[in-house]
Image (cartoon, rainbow, N blue to C red):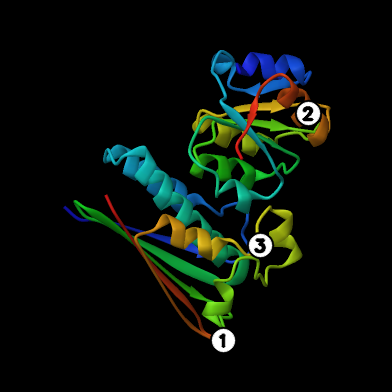
Amino acid sequence: MVIEQQYFVKGGDFSRAGIASSETRKLLKQLGISPEKIRNIVIALYEAEMNIVAHAREGTIRISITRDSILMLLEDQGPGIPDIEQAMKEGFSTASSKVREMGFGAGMGLNNMKRNTDLLEITSTVGTGTTVRMINYF
Amino acid sequence: MKISEVLELCNARLVCGDDRTGNEVLSAFSSDLMSDVLMLPAQKILLITGLCNIQTIRTAEMADIRCILFVRNKKASEEMKQLARENGLVIMETPFSLFRASGLLFARGLSPVY
């Protein structure tokens, strides 16, 4: 069994932010994945989706679900992250005031993605974009 | 604490979830920072917040929070109510401040998350 989904995410569109995560949550529920696993997966995915909306021009989210795992691949076209190690530090943030008004941008998202996933890989090219790869096992 | 008791203590108005006022919340968390809300442990939490936008509802959806109390007369928009209904959330609105609502509920025995 392999289920694949793809979502387009527009930078700056806060009203639609979270739709990919919400759809993924519904799908995982239908598949009978445990609530605790679903919670971890969608929290990580939502944080990553918000990062595209908050920082990038646009991006795509690809979800692949197999019998025992979910792969979440997020690729954006945006400013990139110059220093990933620094960005992973709790409290470090480059978020705009608009993002903070929405209750985000406290510099906790990347850490929370790590906490909630079995594998997190971030690669980034300044001026081009960022790719986030996350895997969770059921 | 039952949701009906939260409504009464905070002089709050029920906006969504008429059929759920008999449900219980085990603890409460007061914050306008959704990043903090996304780090909470999973349990039956009441979120008390002055941050009233669509992402408040989305955050509750992802974090499995079933009940939100908006303070200082913040009004949930139609879009927010629609999303809340789809996800089976209880939404309440109180004229009290974050501090006052939290204090009243704490004094009546509702536990903090941390």
Q: Position of residue B55 (x, y in %)?
A: 62, 47
Q: Residues within 10 Å of mark 2 (few under 14, many from 20)?
A: few
Horizontal placement of A66 versus A84: left or right? left
What kind of residue is marked 3? Gly
- Residue mark closest to the camera, 2 vs 3: 2
Q: Cα distance, mark 2 to mark 3?
A: 28 Å
Q: Position of residue B69 (x, y in %)?
A: 69, 30
Chain assignment, label 1: A
Residue A29 to residue A73: above or below: above
Q: Which mark is residue B70?
A: none
Q: Cα distance, mark 1 to mark 2?
A: 48 Å
Q: Are marks 1 and 2 in contact (CB under 8 Å)?
A: no
Q: Which mark is residue A105?
A: 3
What kind of residue is marked 1? Gly
Dot 2 corresponds to which residue?
B103
Residue B72 visible (yes or no) = no
Residue B65 to residue A132: above or below: above
- Name the foreground residue: A90 vs A5: A90
Residue at 25% over, 55% down: A69
